Image (cartoon, helix red, strand yellow):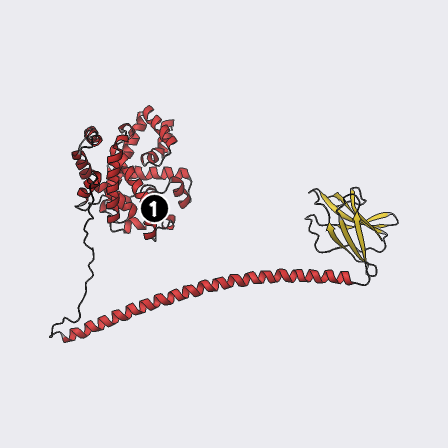
Amino acid sequence: MSKVEDYISSGILESYVMGLTSNWENLQVEAMIAKHPEIKQEVEAIEANLLSLAQAAAVKPHADLKENIFAAIEGRPVPKIERKKEEEVKVIDINVEKPAAGNNTIWKWAVAASVTLLLGSAAFNYYLYGKLEDSNSHLAHLTNEHSDLNKNFASLQTNYGQSTEQLKIYQDANSKMICLTPVSDSSSLAHIYWNQNAKTVFVEVNNLPLAADTMQYELWAIHNGTPQSIGLLPIDHKFDPVIQMSNVDSAQAFAITLEKKGGVLTPAGQMYVLGKI
Amino acid sequence: MLTKEENIAKEDNLVALLKNKDRQGYNMLYDNYAPTLLGVLMKIVGEQEAAEDLLQDVFVKIWNNIGSYDPKKGRLYTWMLNITRNTGIDKLRSKDFKKGEQNRPIDKYVNGIREDSLTSKTDTIGLKKLVEQLKPDQYTVIDMLYFKGYSQSETAEALGIPLGTVKTRARAALLELRTIVT
């Protein structure tokens, strides 16, 4: 296809004629029209076509409209067009009855009564429907509230479980608390709870600087001057409340160093805290 | 039927009359175009009384703005049709109209169903015949763009099709109509 055919088939000319193009696009289209007679011809065809589309939907205006429009153009007051209601409401007077049509009267009363009943029932249904809607939305609200409360409860339960565990560790008579104090960074602090009977070790990290993505804190038990790794602290820096490390038989000191992610066998990185027993 | 050249000559005369604010010119304009423009407005706002009020606004706009109409940029009726559509669409989007109109949901179009126009009793047989020949997806695009005032990107979004498809589909629809009309 040539460039002009491409341009025509892109649909931009239709948009232009319908007034849907931007000012910028208008300039482009007008330049193309001036340059290519085929495009000019196409635009004229589209214009004629859209006119046919509009003409096919033509509607005869009210006879008074023309005069009103001239009044509006010329700045005269525009009268309101009197319109007949399409459907006049017919009022049936049930009292005006021919005497001979006695049977008919009963039917009319019956119809009137049933219409009344129907309207009444419709109104009542509408009322009930409204009530139902109200109840439904109330129920939805309560359901939401219930699920929120459940979530809160679950989270409180978890917290409670953790606190209980923590308390057990603190209160354990066999547990020894060792305070790990800062070596280089003055604000770092941690505590070790070491049960020397059960050999269990818990660490409570009070403060450690946020580690780089490539680094991880490692905990060491130092026995006779030899550090033994007893585990790594979580990389997400979530140390709450206490973390259980590997069991330790004997040690004279504990320390935390910052090592490359995944840990090392012998400490190589910076030591943050150290506590001697 | 007048030839194309005769039509243009006639239109040129009319434009000259309109630019001179000649009452006879506006008389001709009304007689020739009022039903067409009213039909467009009714397609947009759906109700004759509101459409007739808007048609009055349209004629006032034509009267006030005829000086800015440039015959080089398109035919007179294209210019008027666009004024008409914009007037109708402004009304459709105005607050007071939206309040009265509860149900103009975009989802009517989602499946390409053209229920509103075809079931509307205000539609003339002519338009019905025309659009019945179109594929529903083609008609939907024309209806949204031309009569409902959606922008091309709104149309694309509502129908979940690319913008380019909106343009080519509108073109395909109008090409189809061209074969039907002529």
Q: Quadrant of residue A248?
A: bottom right
B91 w.r.t. B69: above or below:
below
In the image, B111 versus A79, the foreground residue is A79
The quarter holding residue A130 reads bottom left
Badge 1 density bin: few <14, some 14–19, many ≥20, Cα 10 Å: few
- Number of labels in the image equals 1
Q: Residue furthest right?
A: A224
Counting from the top left corner in percent of width and height, residue B178 is at 27, 37
Residue A246 rendering spot, x and y as whole percentages: 78, 54
* Relative horizontal placement of residue B88, taking residue B6 as reference (left or right): right
- Circle 1 is placed at which residue position? B94
Position of residue B129 relative to residue A144, above or below, is above
Comparing A276 with A186, the one in front is: A186
Amino acid type, residue under disc 1 in the picture: Ser
> Outermost residue toward the top?
A35
Residue sitting at x 79%, y 63%: A172
> Which residue is pictured at 86% across the width and 52% down the height?
A252
Q: Secondary structure at mark 1?
A: loop
Q: Is residue B109 left or right of residue A263?
A: left
The picture places residue A184, in percent across and down from the top left corner, at 78, 43
Q: Would residue A248 be seen by someone viewing this image from the given angle? A: yes
